[in-house]
Image: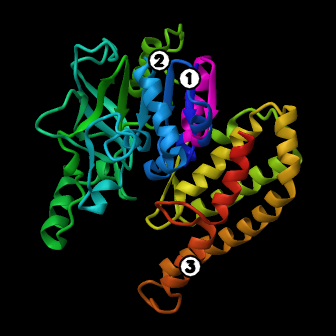
Amino acid sequence: MINILWDASHIWGYLLLHAVRATGIPFRVLKGLDIAHSGLTGKMLIVPGGSARRKFEALGAQGTEAIHRFVEAGGHYMGFCGGAGLALSGNLGLCPWKRDGMPDRMQHLVSGHLVCEVSSGNSVIPASLAGKPALLPVWWPGRFDEPADHQGVEVLARYRAAGPDLYVADMPYASMPGDILSEWNSMYGVTLRPSILDGKPCAVMGELGRGSWLLSYSHLETPSDSTPGSDHASLWFLHILRQWCGADIPLKSLPPLVPARLPILWEDADLISAALRLEALLELAQSLGLLFPRNDWLLGWRSGVPGSQFNSLRAALCTTLGFTPDDRRIRLWNARREEFLKSFELFEQGARSWLLARRLSDTLADASPKLLPRELLVDQRTSLFGSPMFGGGLSEHLLDILEELV
């Protein structure tokens, strides 16, 4: 049995859910309160990305103690990105290391694949990757504060170089000419190269009692896709599950994830309509140049555009439609249907207005910068999408309702 901690995960929760469902291993999705009240059973707890702070708050003291008991008794903890940060000192404290700060905000906004040096000699590393460079995906990663004394922590992989699809914010770093990057640095003092990750740990592991934990700022649960494939990551993810769950998983890699093409098992007219209307919003945003394809499961976005929230809503709606509508889901949906539909209508109108206004603001930026003040766009964005770091807004309300159904 695999446990998945859901709080404050959004798009990363759906990414992990897709990966675990593909393996056929029994799983259950839990919130922090569930763990606090009932503890944990099974072999693994996997925590997807998202806000480590909000996950920690959702667990509380009782949930934190329950996770410690689970690992100390022989359970395994695996955390990706925000789930890795959750396990560090100052939060759960499974790992004695702390999270290192990012003094340059641009250096944090790194996404795509990095070439990583994978260690050898540990059974959680597949033989085909051990001691070799691997392409591993990161999406706005944090950074481990690596002490000179490793305190019993083993480094499984380190960042070494940019991969073929690396972005810094909304700039395609991997395709930028080297002479232009140097010119920007000398003329403007702008450094796009994510140098603060050079040589830093990407994935680490340790033990607690009879159990163990593995923390990765790379999203090993990323499905294979064509732009480019995350085969190394999914190969490693599946190997860990075989090792820690004793499962016979025939997959060689995780199947692609295309949210809009997931099969519809819940043929509810209102949910289907919401999914189609959201797709129309995403198409509008792409036609305006505010969103753009990154891979099969994720749309990239221009700086300042709430792309994460758009991606999370699309994943939530498509995943919900892909579940069988059992009695419990139908009761929950009927109880909140009217509330969702009213909120979605407000969101649809507001998001359409905001996208068009943002595009107009970009057009006016040089000729008439004061005609459409950015402050107005920020206020409207906050009411619709909340904070980029901590969520909120009307989109969060819609996500909460959909996540109840999941």
Q: Is residue 343 visible?
A: yes
Give the x, y percent position of residue 270.
86, 51
Check contact, mark 2 vs mark 1: CB within 8 A: yes
Q: Which residue is mark 1?
A: 2
Give the x, y percent position of residue 191.
20, 61
Q: Which residue is mark 3?
A: 379
Residue 320 image-quadrant placement: top right
Instruction: Please say if 28 is above or below 211.
Output: below
Residue 60: within the magenta?
no
**Residue occupying image coordinates x 68% and y 52%:** 400
Q: Nearer the viewer, residue 324 or 175?
A: 324
Alpha carbon distance from label 2 to label 1: 9 Å
Alpha carbon distance from label 1 to label 3: 41 Å
- Start and end of the magenta stretch? 13-32
267 relative position to 286: left or right: right
Instruction: Identify the mark nearer the N-term, 1 or 3.
Output: 1
387 relative position to 191: left or right: right
223 relative position to 341: left or right: left
Of badges 2 and 1, the one in the foreground is: 1
What residue type is disc 3 on? Asp
Q: Which residue is mark 2?
A: 241
Check contact, mark 2 vs mark 3: CB within 8 A: no
Query: Is the C terminus in the top left, top right, bottom left or bottom right quadrant?
Result: top right
242 relative position to 197: left or right: right
